[in-house]
Image (cartoon, grey):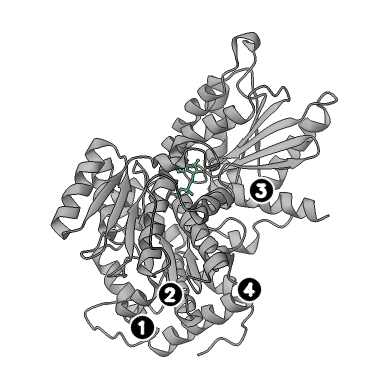
């Protein structure tokens, strides 16, 4: 049955129904059932067939495919921004696509055409076309592959992106993997223009394994015979796995050192990790632009103007983002792993050097009590200078949930059924974070608040009480959902 209601909001409501409910996740976890791996990819192939395409159709998109633990989103954004400079100056690639996850403020940000989030209208159109095609083809094309009538949330969005990009005539598309690589829903592409593997570290251990070697094995799954692959400097164990898998697949894998042509290029933030992401992006964009006949010569001494502008003008929101408000400077960064939080807190520390206003941190990681171990390195990065010894790292530390609003709860695009609702109500994780922070930084004022809106208002309250001429230096981090919710609220305030 075709759905009768077809607005963007209707699409998001349907999409939210495709989230795996917390109770199901918990039951699977208790029974030791791991997420689908080989079968998951077989199911994706079947879904692709049911919506009318074959994996070979995806080759028309000239895909750049990026995996990694950290920096994959930033790398994809850099490549897309370089493409955009070529479009503006040379008219090609004709149309570009960018598929990333998660979203910050609206689901449609995950599917971008010519660098802009797909319109609500087009999102709804392609979302429901995929929906209808799946409804109309309930019989499995391959009887060996058992599957439900619809894939889960992230996989469904991958299908929508392929359908949208193919229908819109996208000529070059950049794809960020969701989790891992080998069994990721984006990994149906068989001949990418190039694959890129950004910095590897520990994350998603339940799915990918608990060592960087096991994780590297999964990420290396996006390398494809016949397509070049690039990576940057990695931990030795991870580098070895990548090299071995490249050999098995007969892939030409290049491990890149930071591109010296980046000297003088103003990338943001001006940090080593971002230079690694930019280095990877340069190699990926160069490969695609050469294939499309848009780049003939690549000078060894300096980057073409289009590359420099693409890197300098790239905007990837919610990553090391600064927003000014009356009496509050908001520093927002969605880092949420041990390594990236170390980088992120150093970035915040460098941003506020020499500033005297009260420091406020707003932090959350919903459902991940183990994130309590990420707090000490943040505290260490913000230690006061010798002149200020005796002061806490942060004057105020707020732990809140990812629920957006105090009155109305989640914004539709942020509904999350995969976490324990009772834990959110009881603020269980937030209380354990608070206890930890009080033990490591006893002079800080530590509070637990139920929503993002409450947390932002708390920081604004501190600003009101701050001495004349001093601004609160607020650091919002730990989760892209938290950062996205905060940006949404701050932007509503801008619009008033
Ligand atoms: N190469 C890197 N090494 C370590 N940390 C990084 C790197 N690149 C980015 N980060 C940190 O991680 C945060 C998220 O960056 P980005 O979105 O590019 O990563 P990602 O791999 O897409 O991760 P995810 O989508 O899981 O958040 C950044 O704001 C920054 O703090």
Whether residue 178 can be seen here: no
Q: Is 282 drawn above or below residue 121 in the view shown?
A: above
For the residue carrying disc 2, how many other residues have a C-alpha within 10 Å: few (<14), some (14-19), or many (20+)?
many
Question: Which sits earlier in the primary sequence, circle 1 or circle 3?
Answer: 1
Q: Give the image location of residue 416, x and y in percent.
A: 54, 58
Q: Which residue bears the numbered disc 2? A: 162
Task: Give the side of residue 68 with respect to residue 304, left or right.
Answer: left
Q: Nearer the viewer, residue 368 or 347?
A: 347
Question: Which sits earlier in the primary sequence, circle 1 or circle 2?
Answer: 1
Q: Which residue bears the numbered disc 1? A: 53
For the residue carrying disc 1, how many other residues have a C-alpha within 10 Å: few (<14), some (14-19), or many (20+)?
some
Q: What is the distance, in whole Å, between disc 4 and disc 1 at their CAs? A: 24 Å
Residue drawn where x is 23% and y is 83% of the image? 143
For the residue carrying disc 4, how many other residues have a C-alpha within 10 Å: few (<14), some (14-19), or many (20+)?
some
Q: Give the image location of residue 167, x and y in percent.
A: 48, 82
The disc placed on residue 267 is: none
Q: What is the distance, in whole Å, between disc 4 and disc 2 at their CAs? A: 17 Å
Residue drawn where x is 30% and y is 84% of the image? 140
Q: Is 390 drawn above or below residue 483 in the view shown?
A: above
* Circle 3 or circle 2, nearest the eye: 2
Tag 1, which secondary structure?
loop
Q: Are marks 1 and 2 in contact (CB under 8 Å)?
A: yes
The disc placed on residue 486 is: 3
The disc placed on residue 120 is: 4
């Amino acid at each position: 049955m075709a759905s009768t209601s077809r607005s963007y909001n209707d699409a998001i409501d349907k999409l939210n129904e495709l989230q795996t409910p917390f109770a199901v996740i918990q039951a699977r976890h208790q029974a030791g059932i791991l997420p689908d791996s080989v079968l998951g990819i077989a199911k994706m192939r079947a879904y692709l067939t049911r919506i009318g395409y074959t994996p070979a159709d995806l080759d028309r998109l000239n895909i750049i495919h990026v995996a990694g633990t950290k920096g994959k989103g930033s790398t994809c954004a850099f490549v897309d921004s370089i493409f955009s400079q070529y479009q503006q100056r040379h008219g090609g690639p004709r149309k570009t696509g960018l598929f990333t996850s998660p979203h910050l403020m609206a689901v449609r940000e995950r599917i971008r055409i010519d660098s802009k989030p797909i319109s609500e209208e087009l999102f709804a159109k392609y979302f429901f076309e995929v929906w209808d095609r799946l409804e109309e083809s309930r019989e499995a094309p391959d009887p060996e592959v058992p599957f439900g009538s619809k894939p889960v949330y992230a996989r469904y969005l991958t299908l929508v992106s392929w359908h949208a990009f193919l229908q819109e005539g996208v000529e070059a598309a950049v794809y960020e993997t969701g989790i891992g690589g080998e069994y990721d829903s984006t990994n149906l592409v068989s001949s990418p223009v190039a694959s890129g593997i950004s910095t590897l570290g520990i994350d998603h251990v339940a799915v990918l394994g608990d060592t960087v070697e096991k994780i590297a094995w999964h990420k290396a799954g996006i390398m494809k015979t016949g397509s070049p692959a690039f990576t940057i400097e990695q931990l030795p164990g991870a580098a070895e796995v990548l090299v071995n898998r490249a050999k098995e697949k007969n892939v030409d894998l290049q491990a890149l050192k930071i591109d010296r042509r980046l000297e003088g290029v103003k990338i943001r933030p001006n940090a080593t990790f971002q230079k690694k992401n930019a280095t990877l992006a340069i190699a990926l964009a160069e490969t695609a632009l050469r294939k499309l006949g848009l780049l003939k010569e690549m000078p060894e001494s300096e980057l073409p103007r289009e590359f420099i502008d693409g890197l300098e003008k790239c905007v990837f929101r919610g990553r090391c983002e600064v927003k000014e408000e009356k009496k509050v400077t908001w520093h927002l960064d969605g880092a949420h792993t041990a390594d990236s939080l170390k980088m992120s807190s150093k970035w915040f520390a460098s941003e506020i050097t020499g500033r005297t206003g009260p420091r406020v941190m707003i932090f959350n990681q919903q459902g991940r009590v183990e994130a309590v171990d990420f707090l000490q390195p943040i505290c260490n990065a913000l230690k006061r200078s010798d002149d200020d010894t005796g002061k806490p790292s942060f004057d105020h530390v707020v732990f809140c949930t990812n629920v957006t609003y105090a009155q109305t709860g989640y914004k539709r695009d942020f509904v999350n059924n995969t976490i324990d609702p009772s834990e959110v109500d009881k603020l269980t994780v937030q209380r354990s974070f608070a206890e930890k922070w009080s033990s490591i930084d006893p002079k800080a004022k530590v509070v637990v608040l139920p929503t993002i809106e409450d947390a932002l208002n708390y920081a604004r309250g501190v600003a009101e009480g701050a001495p004349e001429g001093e601004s609160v230096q607020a650091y919002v981090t730990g989760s892209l959902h938290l950062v996205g919710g905060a940006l949404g609220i701050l932007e509503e305030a801008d619009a008033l």
